[in-house]
């Protein structure tokens, strides 16, 4: 039976793009995909054949980046220093949830989906109260998805091979910072008619089927196996058949390896740091394709570079030899899909975890986005480009991921879940 699947993502590239990957697979398999969206995203979604319902909302990508700059979340502070700012972050997402909850309470009776896919950071009572089967799609790393004492805490960037005492200290500090915000949020959820949330948690993990995109080679299931309501995919990668890219002739004519440099739609708003990194990369003998971000008009690239506000990443990655990234999950999973080594320079949030995991597993090098020296960055480029053994390992990972094509199984999973939710949730 064809399903009508409602997607409720946060309106930012890092959240919507994975949902597009899932939706396009569902559409190809004969299902309907409907997104809650605004005027910014509606035409972009239409290019993939995705239906939308109106959601009055601002552009979270732009507003969110500026907000995080003002809070100090985007900047040179350490993960633990930024974690102390989580109270303000939690307050923002609480207000966002309350807004979304009001919107959905009015929309759900008219849409009447068979299943809802949410990509949010906190629970939405209207979804819970609807009684409609719900899948939580995680466009964050597995440590953010599930806090488990057997693994490092999410957002910490601490190594899975590190000292568990440091895990405990970080985890406890975050709980202390968020405690009052959690209590207020829980009171609101209960007031809406839902059951109380688990302590320290802004949603009830056991209520949902969770799906997440993280390659087996990076996952943490070796140290903390997951329950049956968690299903891993290697990625939620979309196809961009309507977008093409060719290396500009001037750049193609220059010598050296071809390197892709992207700090995503958020981290690139720190123009001062982008200028610093561009000045270092200008001294490299290699060539760079740069995704410059929303403030692309405020800095200039060097002669060995070409860039634009945004570039079609999935068309660029097959052409390059190395990726310099902030460590966002989409770039990490997409780079591994194409077998590309990475220099991961995390700026905030789950990027720290992804960068450390790449480093620990030997698929790249983690550097400090704000403190790395010219010598460190240029040496890391040289090291990775010359590592033939790593190139062979990455080619094997790429072949496995592409051959398995795990996303092709998502339609069957959702069909099964709708027909038999108890198979996944007690």
Image (tube, rainbow, N blue to C red):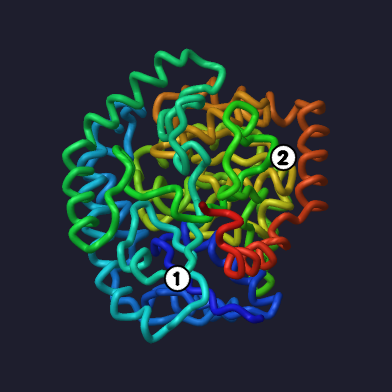
The residue labelled by disc 2 is 257
What number of labels is visible?
2
Q: Nearer the viewer, residue 311 or 171?
A: 171
User: Are there few (<14), some (14-19), or many (20+) residues within 10 Å of tag 1?
Assistant: some
Instruction: Assign a secondary structure to mark 1.
Output: loop
Instruction: Compare marks 1 and 2 and give the one earlier in the sequence.
Output: 1
C-alpha gap between disc 1 and disc 2: 51 Å
Residue 20 can be seen in this image: yes
**Image quadrant where one finds the N terminus:** bottom right
Residue 19 picture location, percent across and down: 53, 63
Q: Position of residue 110 (x, y in %)?
A: 38, 86
- Is 224 located above or below residue 102 in the figure? above
Who's the residue at 72% across and 55% down the image? 406
Q: Are marks 1 and 2 in contact (CB under 8 Å)?
A: no
> Quick one: 337 or 381, which is closer to the camera?
337
Element under label 2? loop
In the image, which disc is placed on residue 69? none
With 179 as the anchor, is 276 left or right in this view? right
Give the residue displayed 61% in from the left and 70% down from the top.
419
Instruction: Using the image, determine if residue 277 lies above or below residue 317.
Output: above
Residue 365 in the image: state x and y as whole percent: 60, 27
Is 84 placed left or right of 148 in the picture? left
Q: Residue at x 47, y 58 (%)?
A: 15
Against 220, residue 372 (above or below) is above
Tell me the tag on residue 132.
Answer: 1
Instruction: Give neighbour class at mark 2: few <14, some 14-19, many 20+ (Cα, 10 Å).
Output: some
Disc number lying in front (1 or 2): 1
Nearest the viewer among 368 and 418 is 418
């Amino acid at each position: 039976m064809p399903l009508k699947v409602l997607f409720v993502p946060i309106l930012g590239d890092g959240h919507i793009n994975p949902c597009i990957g899932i939706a396009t697979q569902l559409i190809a398999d004969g299902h309907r995909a409907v997104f809650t969206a605004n005027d910014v995203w509606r035409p972009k979604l239409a290019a993939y054949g995705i239906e939308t319902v109106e959601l009055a909302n601002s552009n979270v990508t732009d507003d969110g980046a500026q907000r995080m700059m003002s809070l100090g979340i985007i900047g040179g502070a350490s993960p633990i220093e930024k974690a102390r700012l989580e109270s303000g972050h939690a307050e923002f997402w609480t207000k966002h949830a309350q807004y979304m909850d009001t919107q959905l309470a009015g929309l759900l009776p008219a849409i009447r989906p068979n299943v809802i896919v949410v990509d949010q950071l906190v629970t939405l009572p209207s979804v819970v109260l609807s009684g409609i089967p719900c899948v939580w799609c995680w466009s964050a790393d597995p440590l953010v998805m599930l806090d488990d004492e057997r693994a490092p805490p999410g957002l910490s960037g601490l190594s899975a091979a590190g000292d568990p005492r440091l895990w405990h200290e970080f985890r406890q500090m975050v709980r202390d910072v968020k405690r009052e915000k959690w209590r207020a949020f829980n009171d609101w959820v209960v007031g809406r008619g839902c059951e109380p949330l688990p302590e320290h948690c802004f949603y009830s993990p056991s209520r949902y089927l969770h799906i997440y995109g993280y390659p087996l080679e990076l996952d943490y299931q070796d140290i903390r196996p997951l329950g049956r309501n968690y299903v891993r995919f290697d990625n939620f990668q979309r196809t961009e058949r309507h977008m093409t890219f060719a290396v500009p002739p001037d750049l193609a004519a220059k010598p050296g390896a071809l390197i892709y440099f992207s700090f995503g739609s958020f981290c690139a708003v720190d123009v001062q740091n982008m200028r610093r990194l561009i000045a270092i990369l200008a001294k490299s003998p290699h060539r760079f394709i740069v995704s410059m971000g929303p403030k692309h008009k405020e800095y200039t690239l060097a002669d060995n570079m070409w860039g634009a506000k945004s570039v079609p990443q999935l068309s660029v990655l097959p052409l390059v030899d190395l990726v310099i990234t902030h460590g966002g999950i989409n770039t990490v999973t997409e780079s591994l899909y194409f077998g590309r080594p990475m220099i991961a320079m995390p700026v905030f949030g789950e990027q720290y975890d992804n960068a450390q995991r790449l480093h620990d597993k030997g698929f790249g090098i983690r550097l400090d986005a704000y403190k790395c020296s010219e010598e460190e960055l240029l040496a890391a480029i040289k090291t990775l480009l010359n590592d033939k053994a790593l190139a062979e390992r990455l080619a094997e990972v790429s072949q496995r991921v592409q051959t398995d094509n795990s996303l092709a199984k998502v339609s069957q999973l959702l069909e099964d879940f709708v027909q038999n939710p108890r198979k996944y949730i007690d």
